[in-house]
Image (cartoon, helix red, strand yellow):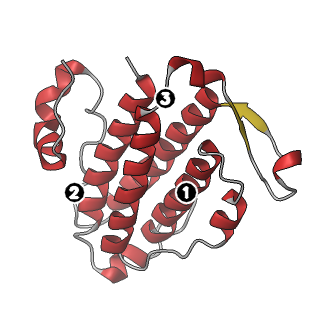
């Protein structure tokens, strides 16, 4: 069982639901000031996507990860953000699908500004755990901000347990996915 793949797919499903709800907002509501770590849905969700790009680059051994981070251009609409997040999520799923258990200990090098040679190094399993935690953390903030709008926040935590299968069938079907046997 590839737990990283399960988490990457759950992440994709949660992002899909959350961003579909956010897409119902006007552009003004998407950018409106809100109370959270980042002061709007747009800023929160763009931060999430930018960090995803950085970590996926690091996981793939791309030494340009710092440039990717610095060159990020925020999405100006919820629809644009959703399309870009979809591509990022699919990239993470493909990366996780290709992993073997031995990859968990593979060292991932980071460039935090002083070059990859002097940056931190972490085992891949810990990097993925951190990335999934980061995604959940900021999705929760966006979910709470969405609760302050006219759009009902969607259910985001029924994607992993087998007993919750009925709650994700429509999402899985829309993506052309089947439950593992």
Spot occupied by residue 84 in the image (x, y as percentages of width and height): 39, 65
- Mark 3 nearby-residue class (10 Å; few <14, some 14–19, many ≥20): some
Q: Earlier in the sequence, mark 3 or mark 1?
A: 1
Spot occupied by residue 144 in the image (x, y as percentages of width and height): 39, 53
Is residue 126 shown left or right of residue 40? right
Q: Is residue 100 above or below residue 74?
A: above
Report the residue marked by disc 3. 99
| Residue 53's disc number | 1
Q: Quadrant of residue 42?
A: bottom left
C-alpha gap between disc 1 and disc 2? 28 Å
Q: Is residue 21 above or below residue 117?
A: below
Q: Quadrant of the C terminus?
A: top left
- Mark 1 nearby-residue class (10 Å; few <14, some 14–19, many ≥20): many
Q: Quadrant of residue 75?
A: bottom left
Report the residue marked by disc 2. 152
Count of numbered tags: 3
C-alpha gap between disc 3 and disc 1? 18 Å
């Amino acid at each position: 069982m590839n737990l990283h793949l399960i988490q990457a797919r759950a992440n994709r499903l949660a992002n899909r639901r959350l961003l579909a709800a956010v897409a119902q907002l006007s552009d003004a509501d998407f950018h409106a000031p809100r109370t959270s770590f980042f002061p709007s849905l747009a800023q929160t969700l763009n931060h999430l996507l930018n960090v995803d790009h950085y970590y996926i680059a690091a996981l793939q051994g791309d030494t340009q990860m710092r440039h990717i981070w610095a060159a990020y251009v925020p999405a100006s609409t919820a629809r644009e953000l959703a399309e870009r997040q979809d591509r990022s999520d699919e990239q993470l799923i493909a990366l996780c699908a290709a992993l073997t258990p031995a990859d968990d200990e593979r060292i991932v090098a980071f460039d935090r500004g002083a070059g990859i040679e002097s940056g931190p190094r972490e085992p891949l399993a810990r990097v993925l755990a951190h990335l999934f935690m980061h995604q959940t953390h900021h999705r929760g903030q966006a979910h709470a901000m969405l609760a302050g709008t006219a759009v009902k926040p969607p259910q985001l935590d029924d994607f992993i347990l087998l007993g919750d299968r009925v709650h994700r069938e429509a999402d899985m079907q829309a993506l052309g996915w089947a439950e593992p046997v």
